[in-house]
Image (spheres, grey):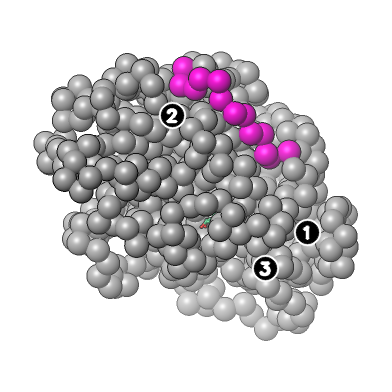
């Protein structure tokens, strides 16, 4: 665990939490609270409203789950065993996406492992229709997890009545809630809550949206701004590469095929067709990857994340369609355009999809922005999928040097400028990464050839094939998510979409290219590749004394600091 994330020697014991929660924490391997946890938990336990801004992966979920669960347990302990008051919905956790709702619910289930007779949780941000969820809500679970839209629907349908019962409201990823178009839902929900209740807002960035939520939801809150702690940022090494569209593909092929990034990797693209373009390109070299986008059925999306976290897949090509919402993402900017764009999302695409925001992908060695994000906020959330919980990680972002139908040099550069300014404010920098293109050129012919095979019609076909495949998978997964894990390893999500195009001779790197790359030194999940040309121009500045010991910033990536 990163020292900077810790309140030094303190353990969770110091936070006076219920013993059963402490046992569960131990079981989850969590010993020392992170900074946001050690600051926010005592305030929340004391009944304060809290606004906490803390960087991605800093443990915000436990920072709100623990005090809420502790308070529920403490309240119930005071009540006679037959008291009606024991059974009521006391806490509501609002999150912007269904993926996050599923993740938070699982987290709560882990935390209540030793008191699940006392505390119950229900996730209603699923595909089930309202009438099927109504009986679950009628049982008055202690905690309800949802997206704002789904809660509002149940309130209107009178399946849920929080007007007397709700004690604690939490809005996670608060910076995203308004840009996902949930403002009306939040206002509606607030109108259904008792006048007196405790609220917490948690966010990785602050923007105008968080400010308006703050005035809407919080009263005299304690405000924690913890992401300026410069020490924390050293865990993420950030690089940028400027190149043509064709070279993006060439470099992605070289990086993955030669395992220059060893370990798990998320490649972000800006739309669904790009997902399939990259997948079809890579699969010709037998590089397998899952795609993750808003068109896939919910169960498949859950399962892909679950299996990626279990280590079944190394590469995910994810769209970050919600990016388009944040084009004007300077602090204090207006989100109206964003909301309109979000509402316009095409049929078949899930408005409540989002994997770059809040999802706890485990052990990601690197995030590759294959397409540069369309907002600085999106950049923060995307790169926040690596270097989580004290682990180290790397981000590599491509900026296009030409205009194509899908990319714009000017837009990439504008967003990059904003990103650089924001990173500088946090004491962090993004360094150019200089590939030795002479060495990479040996692979150019293959790359160009493979790229030529990926036509618009092949992308269309692949997209349809994948959806069909995943709808079938999703049916099989239903019982998995309803009844609890069955072994579903046979349901792979990274199957080739055009097996006919996979060319065996492309699978292996020919000998004549190998000598120059044989010396790649793999270390701690990320390769160090000085002899291939994957060389940083400047070594990242290390601010902590301990950090000075490491000579190459890449060498220890993916490794936990001790
Ligand atoms: N005290 C702790 N010690 C070690 N690991 C922790 C601790 N608290 C949380 N973690 C782990 O850190 C990871 C990130 O936590 P979490 O998802 O809550 O971060 P977050 O701040 O909500 O990130 P994001 O802003 O991206 O949503 C999780 O895998 C979690 O289990």
How packed mark 2 is, by other alpha carbons closer than 10 Å (few <14, some 14-19, many 20 or more), is many
The picture places residue 297, in percent across and down from the top left corner, at: 28, 48
Q: Based on the displayed image, in which of its 4 quarters is residue 191 positioned?
A: top left
Q: Residue at x 38, y 21 (%)?
A: 196
Give the CA distance from mark 1 to mark 2. 52 Å
Disc 3: residue Cβ within 8 A of ligand 1's nearest atom: no
The picture places residue 267, in percent across and down from the top left corner, at: 55, 53
Give the CA distance from mark 1 to mark 3. 24 Å
Side of 297 relative to 1 (left or right): left
Side of 200 relative to 346 (left or right): right
On screen, residue 502 above or below 346 = below
The picture places residue 549, in percent across and down from the top left corner, at: 87, 68
User: Which residue is label 1 attached to?
Assistant: 435
Magenta-drawn segment? 216-228
The image's mark for residue 162 is none
The image's mark for residue 198 is 2
Q: Based on the displayed image, in which of its 4 quarters is residue 129 positioned?
A: top left
Give the CA distance from mark 2 to mark 3. 38 Å
N-term-proximal mark, 2 vs 3: 2
The image's mark for residue 559 is 3
On screen, residue 250 above or below 404 = below
């Amino acid at each position: 665990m990163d020292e900077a994330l810790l309140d030094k020697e303190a353990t969770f014991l110091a936070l006076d939490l219920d013993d059963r929660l402490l046992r569960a924490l131990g079981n989850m391997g969590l010993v020392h609270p992170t900074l946001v946890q050690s600051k926010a938990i005592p305030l929340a336990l004391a009944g304060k409203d809290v606004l906490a801004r803390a960087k991605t992966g800093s443990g915000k979920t436990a920072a709100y789950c623990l005090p809420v669960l502790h308070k529920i347990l403490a309240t119930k302990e005071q009540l006679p065993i037959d008291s009606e008051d024991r059974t009521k919905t006391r806490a509501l956790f609002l999150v912007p996406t269904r993926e996050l709702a599923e993740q938070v619910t699982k987290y709560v289930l882990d935390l209540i492992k030793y008191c699940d007779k006392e505390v119950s949780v229900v996730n209603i941000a699923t595909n089930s229709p309202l009438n099927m969820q109504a009986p679950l809500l009628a049982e008055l679970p202690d905690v309800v997890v949802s997206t704002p839209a789904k809660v509002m629907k149940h309130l209107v349908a009178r399946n849920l009545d929080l007007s007397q019962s709700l004690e604690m409201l939490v809005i996670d990823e608060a910076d995203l809630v308004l840009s996902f178009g949930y403002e009306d839902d939040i206002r509606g929900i607030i109108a259904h809550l008792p006048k007196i209740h405790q609220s917490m807002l948690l966010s990785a960035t602050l923007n105008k949206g968080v400010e308006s939520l703050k005035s809407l939801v919080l009263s005299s809150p304690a405000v924690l701004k913890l992401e300026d702690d410069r020490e924390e940022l050293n865990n993420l090494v950030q690089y940028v590469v400027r190149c043509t569209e064709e070279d993006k593909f060439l470099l992605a092929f070289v990086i993955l095929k030669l395992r220059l990034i060893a370990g798990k990797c998320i490649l972000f693209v800006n739309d669904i067709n790009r997902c399939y373009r990259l997948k079809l390109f890579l699969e010709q070299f037998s590089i397998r990857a899952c795609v993750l986008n808003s068109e896939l059925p919910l169960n498949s999306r859950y399962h892909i994340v679950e299996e990626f976290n279990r280590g079944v897949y190394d590469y995910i090509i994810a769209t970050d369609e919600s990016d388009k919402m944040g084009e004007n993402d300077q602090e204090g900017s207006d989100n109206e355009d964003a909301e309109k764009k979000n509402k316009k999302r095409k049929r078949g695409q899930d408005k409540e999809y989002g994997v770059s925001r809040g999802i706890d992908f485990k052990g990601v060695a690197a995030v590759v922005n294959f397409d540069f994000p369309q907002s600085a906020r999106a950049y923060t959330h995307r790169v926040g999928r690596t270097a989580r919980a004290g682990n180290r990680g790397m981000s590599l972002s491509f900026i296009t040097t030409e205009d194509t139908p899908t990319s714009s040099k000017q837009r990439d550069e504008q967003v990059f400028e904003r990103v650089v300014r924001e990173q500088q404010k946090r004491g962090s920098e993004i360094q150019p990464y200089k590939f030795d293109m002479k060495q990479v050129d040996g692979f150019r012919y293959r790359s160009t050839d493979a790229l030529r095979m990926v036509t618009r019609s092949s992308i269309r076909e692949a997209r349809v094939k994948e959806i069909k495949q995943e709808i079938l998978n999703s049916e099989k997964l239903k019982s998995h998510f309803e009844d609890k894990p069955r072994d579903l390893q046979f349901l792979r999500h990274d199957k080739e979409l055009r097996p006919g195009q996979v060319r065996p001779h492309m699978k292996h790197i020919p000998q004549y290219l190998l000598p120059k790359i044989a010396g790649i030194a793999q270390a701690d999940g990320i390769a160090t590749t000085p002899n291939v040309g994957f060389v940083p121009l400047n070594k990242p500045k290390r601010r902590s004394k301990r950090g000075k010991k490491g000579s190459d910033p890449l060498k220890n990536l993916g490794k936990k600091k001790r």
